[in-house]
Amino acid sequence: MFPFARSLMAVVAVALASLAGGALRADVLTLANGDKLKGKLIRNADGMITFKSDVLGEIVVPAAKASVTVDPPLPAAPVAVADAVAPAPAVAAAAPAVGATAQAAVPEALAKPKPKPKRKIRLTPFTTLDPRSAAKDPGRAAKADDTGWFNRINFGLVSQSGRTKSISIDLNTENDLRTPLTDTRFANRYLYGRTAGITSDNAISSSLRFRRVLSSRFFLQSNTRYDRNTITSIQADAEQGLGLGINLKSTKTIVLAAGSEAAVRYRAFLPPDANTPAAPHDLGCVFNVFQDMLLRFNQRFMFTQNFLARIAPTNDNDYKLNFNAGLTSKLTDAFDITAGVELEYDRTLQPELRYKQRITTSIGYVF
């Protein structure tokens, strides 16, 4: 046989082997929903996969929503002609590696940016507990993103009955600093109202409460308090207490805690009128019992309630009871509205001044 004919037969044999490998090649395109298509990978670059399906024809899908598995090519057929020119190894080298997987190789700069997380709802009613810390301990933040400063302003109108009937202004501020083990809260309140041209409410109160976690159920509490109320002739009512609290219930929907503390109290009184001297100031010890509850219905509505009893162990007639409850509804991320009721009974005051009830509707701003 002539040398030219032998060379031509070798080239034809190599071409037939290459075509046989391509014909039997079956790449697999796996979609995000699990569906698989057989065919041939055309291109995988710039975040897009171009694939020729045996059924659907040529399709283009995002690389982030699909992956391609490339089948290995058939081995090159042996050439029977001894001295033929054999470019088969070069052709085989150009074929994809065995078992190669063409996953979406998208540069980080071209990858789609992740959507920004939505702002977390921060509803904080003006009570001793707050919905952002529905944790094992109401005196601490249970999560890393629940630490730092949290501030709130409440402004409301008060409908009061009992001692007097009036419309008053109720302004509250709260600054709360939280760490994983402590909770420091500074709260202030100003209440002022007039009825028929006469001042019916004129009170200022401040408190600084510190809580420190002792265990999963117990916490230490220190409370400093100051009150002034010209209507009830209280010039200054200052108190420093220290005590313990316990978590009675703690789930994602309800937090219930209670505790007690011993405190030193100082009281100074205003004269009831120009002709009557003021009562002597009083310095003594009191025993306080507190209880806090938070019930969260969903991210929009929650119910808060707290109770405080101050009792002087040396005087049966010296005690004060205070009960607060409120239903808060979220309006926006920063604003909410609270409808609350406050009941108070102070045995140390004159009979006509002992009982007090307020029904308040307030708008709160969290920042």
Image (cartoon, grey):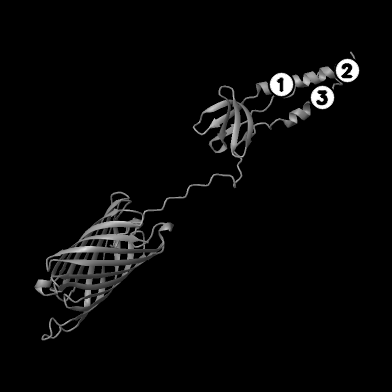
Give the side of residue 17 with respect to residue 324, left or right.
Answer: right
Look at the image and tell me whether residue 235 can be seen: yes
Give the side of residue 303 with respect to residue 151, left or right.
Answer: left
Of the two numbered discs 3 and 1 on the same chain, state the one appearing first in sequence. 1
Look at 82% across and 24% down and name the residue there: 86
Query: Relative to residue 168, is residue 15 depicted above or below?
Result: above
Secondary structure of residue under mark 1: helix
Q: Amino acid under label 3?
A: Ala
Q: Amino acid under label 1?
A: Leu
The quadrant in which the C terminus is found is bottom left
Determine which quarter of the picture holds residue 334.
bottom left
* Residue named by callout 1: 19
Query: Relative to residue 255, is residue 34 depicted above or below?
Result: above
Query: Relative to residue 10, is residue 141 depicted above or below?
Result: below
Q: Position of residue 272 (x, y in %)?
A: 13, 81
Secondary structure of residue under mark 3: loop
Look at 13% across and 74% down and name the residue there: 349
* Residue named by callout 2: 4
Determine which quarter of the picture holds residue 28.
top right
Q: Residues within 10 Å of mark 3 (few under 14, many from 20)?
A: some
Q: Which mark is residue 86?
A: 3
- The span from disc 3 to disc 2 (Cα, nearest Å) is 14 Å
Q: Verify CB contact (< 8 Å) between mark 3 and mark 1.
A: no
